[in-house]
Image: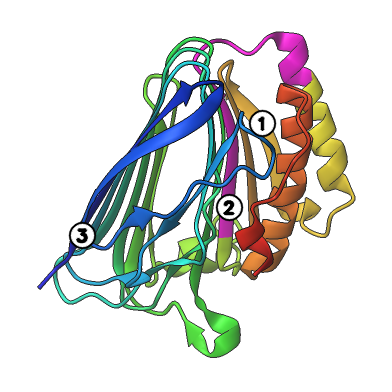
Amino acid sequence: MPWLAQLELDYAVSHGRSVVHHRHNGPLRVLRSLYPEGDAVCHNVLVHPPSGLVSGDTLDIRARVASGAHALLTTPGATRFYRTNGAPALQDTRLTLDAGARLEWLPLETIAYSGCDGHNRLQLQLAPGAELIGWDITALGLPHAGLPFVTGRYTQHLELPGQWLEHGTLAAGDALLMDGPLGLAGQRCLGSMFFVTGSAIARERREAALEMTRALIESHALAPRCGVTSPHDQVIVLRALAPMVEPVMQLWQQVWRLWRAHFWEMPAIAPRIWAM
């Protein structure tokens, strides 16, 4: 039988500390809150014990951050879409930020295994003054482990309604898309990183971020297949293609440190789970 796992997270400020109240149904939850950088930022790790999705499974994640609160969410390992037989598998995430809230959505990579029918949907709702740093990294199969992505499909949906939308389906059998020079060009890892706000980003602030990010990626091995742009005055997006996850994750963490310092004047304290 398919599994439905639901998790609701509500962040607020209580006595000067960002705290979370959570409710769950099924095998999806957060454990204790961590404060490696003090009371202002609440770190949580999303735990899904089955560690993967098959036919008909759904992960339903809802997070709301109240005014003045700051949360950081990550995962202990990759999200995996395994082979499906008929019904697709879905991860549906909705992140809502009230005015003046901050959120960092930093999950580890998603792996789409050969034969999967996976749907990964992320929708963002930000009130004026709210700001979010997030990323998504997808690996199509595990070609270096002898498990290439030869059948199946993976659909990705990233949206800030009215300002930014990325929606596309990667079908393993589409040779032009998978291997053509205007498609993935034979690369099997793709990533998007984004800074989005509920109000227009001041031009000087936005241009400075673009310049600093471009300077950083120029010296990186992924520079030929990486670029940053601002498709809307509330959105900055960095994209990359790579043969595997590791160089994308390394670059994304460098940019995360850069953006945290630039936009929020905060040092980057990496979640301890990343070192395990």
What stretch of residues is rendered in magenta? 190-207
Looking at the picture, how far across and down is residue 179, in whole percent?
54, 68
Mark 3, mark 2: which one is toward the viewer? 3
* Front position in the image: 22 or 205: 22
Quarter of the image with the C terminus is: bottom right
Is there any visible trace of residue 175 in the rendered image?
yes
What amino acid is found at the position of numbered circle 1 in the picture?
A: Thr
* Front position in the image: 259 or 116: 259
Looking at the picture, how far across and down is residue 21, in whole percent?
35, 36
For marks 1 and 3, the one nearer the N-term is 3
Q: Which residue is mark 3?
A: 26
Q: Is residue 95 above or below residue 193?
A: above
Local crowd at mark 1 within 10 Å, few (<14), some, or many (≥20)? some
Q: Which residue is mark 2?
A: 191
Residue plotted at (59% across, 34% down): 41
Q: CA distance from mark 1 to mark 3?
A: 39 Å
Is there any visible trace of residue 242 in the rendered image?
no
What amino acid is found at the position of numbered circle 3 in the picture?
A: Gly
* Front position in the image: 100 or 205: 100
Determine if the magenta segment contains residue 275: no
Determine if the magenta segment contains residue 196: yes
Residue plotted at (77% across, 11% down): 204
Quarter of the image with the N terminus is: bottom left
Q: Which residue is mark 1?
A: 229
